[in-house]
Image (cartoon, grey):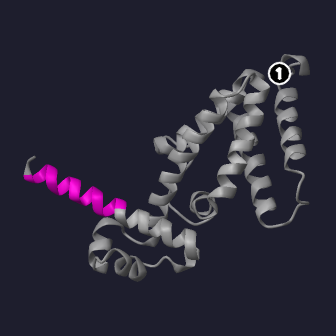
Amino acid sequence: MGIAERKSRERADREDRIVAAARGIAESEGWEAVTIRRLAKEIEYSQPVLYSHFENRDAIVAAVAIEGFRELAATLCAAAEGAKGRREALTDLAMAYFDFAQSRPSLYEAMFVLPTQLRFAEAETRPELRAGFEALAAAVSPFCADAEIVTETFWAALHGLVALERAGRIRPGMRDERIALVVRAIVDAGGHSRSRG
């Protein structure tokens, strides 16, 4: 292994440690506990070393979010692969989305709530962000002509329901019924009969 390759690998390892530490602190104490000073202490690097990898805390949050989008895409793809039909794939994806958000609240917060420079629906959108959208679009597309707008709406509905449920703003115990309504709206929006699902 050459010197340049070794240094590159060491840099990547340090970045992985920083991201893992940020995620660990956020999961146990919340994002407000994640500071550059705390991370430096946690992983035993100086603050200038952290700043040599990440411009600021928001950049670290973005790196955590990117990991989250990678994990979300894998979760959604696995849910769709296990489905017995197209309508079931939509339902399974929606359930998997909820399970992901509920089981990883700090990660979900990094992905969708905290400020980052990550951009969606643009030419520069990172592939990790696109992968989750594409997993949803693959399940939505059999039911509509314009899969992009319907997928955006499906994702927005799921995110809205997750946010309201997490905040205790909607009645508990009604998730299955809400998901069924969203899935029915997607299926019906395409003009397909219910029997085709």
Residue at 58% x, 45% y: name it. 72
Q: Is residue 36 magenta?
A: no
Could you tell me if residue 144 is visible in this image? no
Magenta residues?
3-16
What residue do we see at 22% from left, 53% from top?
A: 9
Q: Is residue 12 magenta?
A: yes
Q: Amino acid at mark 1?
A: Gly
Locate the C terminus and report the quarter of the image it occupies: top right
Location of residue 10 in the rendering, given as x and y in whole percent from the top left corner: 22, 59
Q: Position of residue 136 (x, y in %)?
A: 66, 35
Give coordinates of residue 89: x percent, y percent: 72, 29
Work out whether residue 60 can be spotted.
Answer: yes
Principal SS element in the magenta part?
A: helix
Q: Single out the residue that lies furthest toward the left.
A: 2
Helix, strand or loop at disc 1? loop
Which residue is the site of mark 1?
Answer: 197
Q: Measured along the vertical axis of the image, is residue 196 above or below residue 75?
A: above
Q: Is residue 177 above or below residue 34?
A: above
- Seen at 82% across and 24% down, the residue is 190
In this rendering, would 58 be left or right of 167?
left
Is residue 150 placed above or below 69 in the rendered structure?
Answer: above
Q: Nearer the viewer, residue 155 or 102?
A: 102
